[in-house]
Image: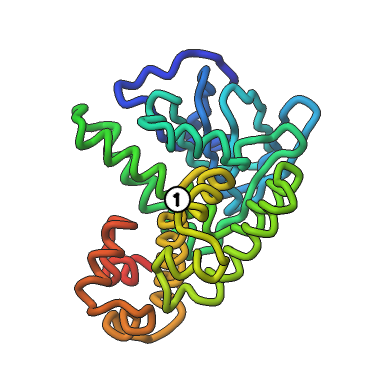
Amino acid sequence: MLSSIELKSIYGFDAGTATYLTENDHLFQQHNDVYQLLWLQKGKVSVIMSTNKKELTEGDCLFLGKNELFRLTADESYSLCYVQFTDNFYCRTEVDRHFLDKCVFFDNTKAINSITLKPEQAAFAQYYFISLLKLQSKTYSNLNYMTAHNIIERVLLFIMACHINTYVEFNKEKLSPAQLKNVIKFNELIKTNIRKERNVQFYADHMNISVSKLTEISKDIYGTTPKKIIASAVVNEVKLLLKHTPLTIKEIAYELNFEDSSNFTRFFIKATGLSPKEYRESL
């Protein structure tokens, strides 16, 4: 089941599905020098990495850093989706490199890191996964490469925003007391004010620091900008309102303090690739 080979892809990423103990088995291949995301859609699977072992159930999402070898075992049929990507694919800039280095979800030295996607989060993940499958079958172009890169970046930011408390918990031992204080304050401000405030200046002012200092803190801890973290949190709020309330698109735009519904729709499409209406219909 395991093989260590180079990822042969002109894009630098691979996406696919794997099944086990079914009529049409597709076994999962591991490659050299790739980061990996595994999402278990059906069944139960045991993941073994060196001395660590973890049981995954439906909806669990597993993160594996570069060259982290593992073995999957199961007593019943399962189905999982996987995405693998290389450094060269993801790291266009120093910010991209910093983000991967700081993304502690990929660090499994002490325990195997996983999160469980809620149903509405799984619908989002499924949309992006299908988009990647379609892209990798297309002729290479800079536009398709950038689209694939943006999708994987959005997925990582989305997961970080949905599980920000888990992210901070993973990071605790690596943060200084001052860093921990700042990240907790930033998270609390986002939770309290995200429906009305998207301006980085607002959060910096309430932390009694400059925007440049908040950006420095954010890049140091999360590996990305406060603007992207705030935007991901807004997208999560939108999805909650689209799924769990009867509010119209216009009413949701008003609830989240957008100037008008057209600006709101453009923001959501840029962040997810779907219009609010399309996302609601997909649920």
Residue drawn where x is 63% and y is 65% of the image: 185
- For the question of whether residue 268 can be seen, the reply is yes
**69 up-or-down from 133: above or below:** above
Query: The disc labelled 1 sits on which kind of residue?
Result: Thr
Q: Residue furthest right?
A: 51
Q: Quadrant of residue 10?
A: top left
State whether residue 75 appears in this view: no
Q: Is residue 81 above or below residue 252?
A: above
- Where residue 68 appears, as percent x and y from the top left, is 63, 25
Residue 175, image x, y percentages = 70, 46
Is residue 247 positioned above or below 86 on the image? Answer: below
For the point 38% across and 86% down, which residue is it?
A: 246
SS for tag 1? loop
Query: x, y (%) of residue 248?
Result: 30, 84
Q: Nearer the viewer, residue 281 or 248?
A: 248
Residue 252, above or below 70: below
Residue in the foreground of this view, choosing between 212 and 168 = 212
Query: How is the rendered protein coloured?
Result: rainbow
Label 1, residues with CA under 10 Å away: few <14, some 14-19, many ≥20: some
Report whether 256 appears left or right of 184. Answer: left
Q: Looking at the rendering, in which quadrant would you find the N terminus?
A: top right
Residue located beneath label 1 in the image: 225
Q: On the rendered structure, is 246 left or right of 98?
A: left
What x and y, as percent, mark residue 17? 45, 37
Q: Measuring 54% from the left and 61% from the top, which residue is drawn there?
A: 209
